[in-house]
Image (cartoon, helix red, strand yellow):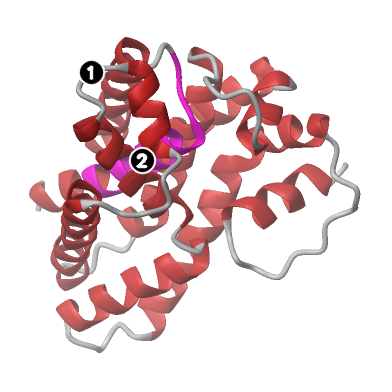
């Protein structure tokens, strides 16, 4: 089995030390997309292991520590996309070109800051509730569902930039394998008895894709990152509200 697509997905989506065969070709980016949910599973497993090791700690400090570790593992990659998307959606005034232009601005505006605070606060609050009840399974599943939604986004919407890593991936996407990988993430949640988490992730994918299609005609790397963060937070909150 060729492990290079998984290594490339790990190198792109995490800050884990991974050796990738170079030079990376555009086709390689596409082959890595079906591995996104598996990367989410690894992130979830690492976070769940940390939670288990520190299970005697108070729930709120432990939840904050886990979110910090989460951000560290991913290098805030998707949070950056969330902030850019929030700024662009608010400042774009419904105009496609203006929205895309604002997304390219590296500065973080008020909408981006608010979006970051809300998502991080939502994750900490949900995790504190879940950890206090000994429910660690949701921590394992949330990163999987987020990246499953991201993989599915590549299948259902066209990419809207002329270049970039996501553009290479979209142009060389193995569509069937990517769709199956996304469905596998949902199936894992269902097998684990987390129906609401799976349902929330599907609803956010459908709603997010509809908004992206309406405003942009497709997706960008930033909006894909925003979707990952939204699905992670919303699925955790859904699991916490069921307790």
Residue 63 in percent (x, y) is at 24, 73
Q: In the picture, residue 189 is in which quadrant?
A: top left
- Sooner in the amino-acid sequence: mark 2 or mark 1: 1
- Residue 103 to residue 153: above or below: below
Front residue (pair 20, 104): 104
| Residue drawn at x 40%, y 52% as measured from the top left | 80
Labels 2, 1: front one: 1
Sort mark 2 into few (<14), some (14-19) or many (20+) by Cα contacts within 10 Å: many
Q: In the picture, residue 174 is in which quadrant?
A: top right
Q: Is residue 4 left or right of residue 89?
A: right
Residue 191 in view in this figure: no
Classify mark 2: helix, strand or loop.
Answer: helix
| Residue drawn at x 26%, y 80% as measured from the top left | 62
Q: In the picture, residue 211 is in which quadrant?
A: top left
Q: In which quadrant will I find the N terminus?
A: top right
Q: Which mark is residue 226?
A: 2
Q: Which mark is residue 94?
A: 1
């Amino acid at each position: 089995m060729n492990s290079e697509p998984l290594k490339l997905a790990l190198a792109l989506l995490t800050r884990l030390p991974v050796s990738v065969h170079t030079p990376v070709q555009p086709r390689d980016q596409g082959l890595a997309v079906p591995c996104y949910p598996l990367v989410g599973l690894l992130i979830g497993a690492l976070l769940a292991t940390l939670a288990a090791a520190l299970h005697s700690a108070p729930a709120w400090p432990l939840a904050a520590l886990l979110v910090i570790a989460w951000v560290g593992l991913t290098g805030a990659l998707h949070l950056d996309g969330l902030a850019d998307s929030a700024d662009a959606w608010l400042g774009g005034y419904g105009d496609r070109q203006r929205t895309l232009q604002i997304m390219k601005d590296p500065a973080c505006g008020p909408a981006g800051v608010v979006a970051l605070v809300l998502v991080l606060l939502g994750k900490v609050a949900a995790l504190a509730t879940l950890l206090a009840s000994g429910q660690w399974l949701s921590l394992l599943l949330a990163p999987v569902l987020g990246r499953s939604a991201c993989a599915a986004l590549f299948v259902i919407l066209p990419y809207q930039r002329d270049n970039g890593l996501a553009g290479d991936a979209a142009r060389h996407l193995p569509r069937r394998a990517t769709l199956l990988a996304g469905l596998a993430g949902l199936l894992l949640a269902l097998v684990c008895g987390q129906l609401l988490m799976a349902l929330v992730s599907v609803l956010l994918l459908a709603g997010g894709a509809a908004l992206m299609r309406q405003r942009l005609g497709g997706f960008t790397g930033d909006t894909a990152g925003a979707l990952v963060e939204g699905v992670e937070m919303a699925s955790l909150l859904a699991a916490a509200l069921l307790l």
